[in-house]
Image: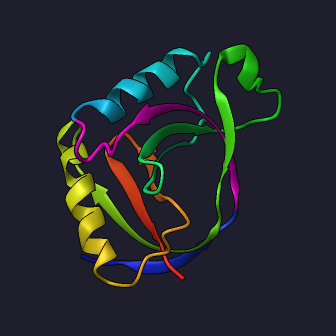
Amino acid sequence: MRCVRVTRNDTPVMFVTAEGDPRIVSGAAQRVFNELESRLETLRGRRFFGVFEPQSSEYLACVQTKDGDDARALGLGQTLIPGGAYLRTTITGQPPAVYAQIGPTFEELEKHERSDPNRPLIEFHRRYNEIDLLVPVA
């Protein structure tokens, strides 16, 4: 697995949440992404993220905010995905098979460097078949 250290800026997002680690709770991530996407007028030009908060065991299906977005009117929460140093790798494949790679790949990434428990694990959905996985590092 090829991984690189990157620095990300804080990213403002709107989100829908699910309880539990999606690597364990089957279908949780797909359900909340379907709910998030159904509330948006269009998906074109949007950046989507999956965020897992280990301390609270919450998974957030997120979309980066754009000027004019009204999270409250859409019935969505708002937060910032924290920036900082992350270890990144990219997985590819056809959905839904590519989603099965997420959990095991995060586990492998976490073996490379000590992760920062105060920041979330991030999935950046570049395309339907390409996902960057990011583990926070100190």
- Where residue 102 appears, as percent x and y from the top left, is 27, 53
Q: Is residue 99 shown left or right of residue 59?
A: left
Residue 107 location, quadrant: bottom left
* Residue at image location 39% in from the left, 61% down from the top: 133
Vertical placement of residue 97 versus 110, above or below: above
Is 23 magenta? The answer is yes
Q: Is residue 101 above or below residue 113?
A: above
Q: Residue at x 59, y 37 (%)?
A: 63
Name the spot of residue 61 as percent of width and height, x first: 48, 36
36 shown above or below 120: above
Q: Quadrant of the image for the N terminus?
A: bottom left
Image point 32% across, 32% down: which residue? Answer: 28
Magenta segment boundaries in residue numbering: 10-25
Residue 6 sits above or below residue 28 on the image:
below
Give the left or right position of residue 55, taking residue 40 as reference.
left
As drawn, the residue found furthest toward the front would be 56
Position of 52 with respect to 6 (left or right) is: left
Colour mapping: rainbow
Residue 65 inside the magenta-drawn segment: no
Q: Where's residue 21, x and y in %? A: 33, 46
